[in-house]
Amino acid sequence: MAISDSTALRYTQRDPDVRLMLEVRDDSAAAFEELMLRYQNRLVMVLTHLIGSYDLAEDLAQEVFLRVYRARKRYVPGAKFSTWLFTIANNVARNALRSKSRRREVNLVATESGAAAANPLEMMAQAASGLMPARQVARSEMQEMVREALGVLNERQRMAVLLNKFEDMCYADVAEVMQISPQAVKSLLARARENIKEVIRPYLENGERPDIGR
């Protein structure tokens, strides 16, 4: 879809990553390397929780960057760079999930994704629960609990949560990545919060682990 020159200029001026991508469009290897450094860990974290495999997430992140590079000559700054990047990541992840489903190898329990995921996991657990824990919960326990809770969500709910809570995207940006309406994003997040609450509440109240079948 064509965009106006003023729209392109607005994103170019406001988003330094857009400016880097324009340099990539002009075949700057240094700019591409900088974008990879900025987004590699973030991509792997989101893909790990979405796909359920850290090793596969690393491979898919490389596929995302490969697609970015291949598309560089067609790039037009019509959105924030992160929105454009995660739109590609969403498509790559959906293809991977379909492939895993066909091979009957789906595993929704995310593996350890590193220290970078610690704070978002912990913050999301506290926000989702809406409860004051009746006992002290260790950070590692909380992170594990949230991973299990994420596994309860369906693919669309999980992607919406990851983009909104982990990437701090607004409803409009999540909607653009997922190619749905902002209202649909709001509904997905509301249902996701209820599902996560259902998993986390007994654990926070009395330490009961959920019986989540895989």
Image (spheres, rainbow, N blue to C red):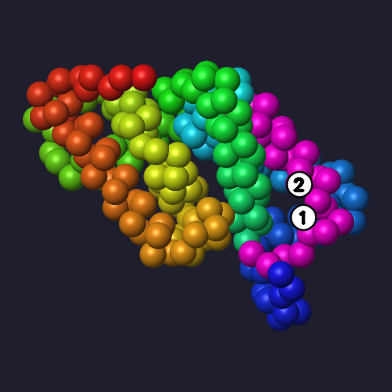
Amino acid type of the residue tagged 1 in the rendering: Met
Mark positioned earlier in the residue sequence (2 or 1):
1
The circle drawn on residue 183 is none
Is 49 positioned to the left or the right of 38 in the image?
Answer: left
Residue 20, horizontal then vertical, whole percent: 76, 55
Residue 155 lies left or right of residue 8; in this view the side is: left
Q: Residue at x 52, y 18 (%)?
A: 105
Evaluate whether residue 113 shows in this view: no
For numbered disc 2, what is the local secondary structure? helix
In magenta segment, residue 64: yes
* Residue shown at the point (47%, 32%) measured from the top left: 49
The location of residue 45, given as percent across then percent down, is: 53, 33
x, y (%) of residue 190?
29, 52
The residue positioned farthest toward the front in the image shown = 102
Quarter of the image with the N terminus is bottom right
What segment carries the magenta color? 57-79
Q: Quick check: can you spot residue 151? A: yes
Helix, strand or loop for disc 1: helix
Q: Say which amino acid is labelled 2.
A: Val
- Residue situated in front as seen by the camera: 85 or 124: 85
Viewer-side residue, 51 vs 14:
51
Q: Quadrant of residue 29?
A: top right
- Tell me if residue 113 comes above or below residue 3 in the rendering: above
Q: Mark 2 sits on what residue? A: 68
Query: Is the residue under label 1 in contact with that under label 2 (CB below 8 Å)?
Result: yes
Residue at the location (88% across, 49% down)?
28
Residue named by callout 1 = 21
Q: Is residue 137 above or below residue 1?
A: above
Secondary structure mainly formed by the magenta segment: helix
Mark 2 crowd level (few <14, some 14–19, many ≥20, 10 Å Cα): many
- Please state, as top left, top right, bottom left or bottom right, where the C terminus lies in the image: top left
